[in-house]
Amino acid sequence: MNYHFANHRQVRKNLLHILQNTSEKDLLAIPDGFNNNIYWNIAHCVAQQQLLCYYLSGNQFRIDKYWVETYKKGTFANVDVKQSEMEDLAYLLIETSKILMKDFDNDFFPDYTPYSTSFGVDLKNIQDAIIFNNMHESIHYGYILAQKRALIGEGLSL
């Protein structure tokens, strides 16, 4: 699983780089053809990791429930996000990756409720969830890159 955790850390570093190096205006803009913004996609990754790994294993979230409720699947972007929330998200991107690895190493996930994702992947245990979560976050990283290109095309991003 070390390989999968290393991949997760890299995806999170990529997301953090975008969060910290994209203007607030661009983070919160919803480009034409998209339902959400860059910021929502980043926060969504943190929220879904909690649902896929902690909720389905019967454990408490490792973050405030606010993040899960606000950025889970089916939610929409808030274009009025405070700077303090953006700073919290930067922290959570890295910390939730570290915590997941520690929890896995400490056998924190002995139970897991099987789940069929909307992507068509069946999750049977925490290992499946971690591997799928990497794929999920990578898909959202791709969305973010497409959103950045769309914003450039709209003349909103420099």
Image (cartoon, rainbow, N blue to C red):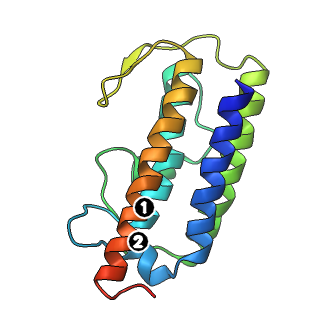
Observer-nearest residue: 55 or 1? 1
Point 49% across, 45% down: residue = 137
Q: Are marks 2 and 1 in contact (CB under 8 Å)?
A: yes
Observer-nearest residue: 153 or 28? 153
How busy is the neighbourhood of tag 2: few (under 14 within 10 Å), some, or many (20 plus)?
Answer: many
Residue hosting label 1:
144
Quadrant of the image containing the N terminus: top right
Point 64% across, 18% down: residue = 109
Q: CA distance from mark 2 to mark 1?
A: 6 Å
Residue 130 in picture, x, y percent from top left: 57, 28
Q: Does residue 68 appear left or right of residue 8 in this picture?
A: left
Residue 129 visible, this orientation: yes
Residue 95 in picture, x, y percent from top left: 72, 49
Point 60% across, 49% down: residue = 11
Observer-nearest residue: 7 or 103? 7
In the rendered structure, which amino acid carries the disc numbered 2?
A: Lys
Residue 74 in picture, x, y percent from top left: 28, 46
Kind of element beneath mark 1 = helix
Q: Is residue 137 above or below residue 111?
A: below
Q: Is residue 121 above or below residue 96?
A: above
In the rendered structure, which amino acid carries the disc numbered 1?
A: Ile
Point 66% across, 48% down: residue = 10
Q: Which mark is residue 148?
A: 2
Residue 61 in picture, x, y percent from top left: 58, 36
